[in-house]
Amino acid sequence: MEPNSAESAPFLVRLAVRADLPALLRLYRDLNPDDVALQVEAAEEHFLALERIPGSGVHVCVLNGTPVSTCTLVVIPNLTRGGLPYALIENVVTAAEHRGQGYGRATLQHAVSAAWKQDCYKVMLLTGSTKPETLAFYLSAGFEQNKTGFQIRRIVARAE
């Protein structure tokens, strides 16, 4: 992908590679600081499993060689909508010191574009946040808040 220009500095949005894993694991601490830390070796196994799902991957925004924003896109085969797949975006996070500068929005747009290239008919994203700025962020990235979501959890949700 070509470098972009956010409000402050040039950056590159691309699919993550295995060499990004240590930096991604640090970035995920901003998302879920209370999670048990995943070791790089275990993360590699999960990363490779995700790569085996056609069209799926971790999208990352890199600033000065360091990932500052990321999200995961999973493309799901489908038996409705004429067999068109759909996609789910999860693990959306921008490093705290880089929020509000366009990196997260560019990362989401990169992932959505990848979903459209896979012929997905929709892209879904859930957030547990009720913060107005978080909801405004997703709206500004082109998402609509028009569905009711339900979930069952084995792991306690993080506190907002």
Image: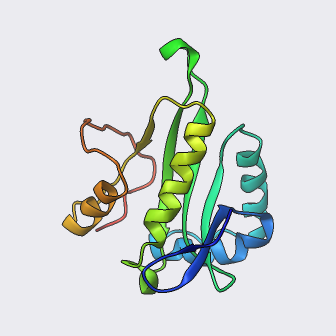
Q: Is residue 33 visible?
A: no
In this picture, residue 56 sits left or right of residue 99? right
In this picture, residue 154 sits left or right of residue 39? left
Q: Is residue 151 visible?
A: yes
Measuring from the top left, give residue 143's x and y in whole percent: 34, 48
- Given residues 43 and 82, the one toward you in this image is 82
Coloring basis for residues: rainbow
- Given residues 31 and 82, the one toward you in this image is 82
Q: On the image, which quarter does residue 39 sit in?
A: bottom right
Task: Give me the residue at 75% from left, 47% from top.
Answer: 51
Q: On the image, which quarter does residue 100 sit in?
A: bottom left
Task: Give me the residue at 50% from left, 42% from top.
Answer: 88
Q: On the image, which quarter does residue 66 sit in?
A: bottom right
Measuring from the top left, give residue 89's x and y in whole percent: 49, 48
Query: In the picture, which quadrant includes the C terminus?
Result: bottom left
- Given residues 53 and 108, the one toward you in this image is 108
Measuring from the top left, give residue 14's x and y in whole percent: 66, 62
Q: How many marks?
A: 0
Eyeballing the image, is 134 above or below 74? below
Task: Give me the residue at 70% from left, 63% from top.
Answer: 16
Task: Give me the residue at 65% from left, 86% from top.
Answer: 64
In this picture, residue 19 sits left or right of residue 53? right
Eyeballing the image, is 72 above or below 82? below
Measuring from the top left, give residue 71's x and y in whole percent: 54, 59
Query: In the picture, which quadrant includes the N terminus?
Result: bottom right
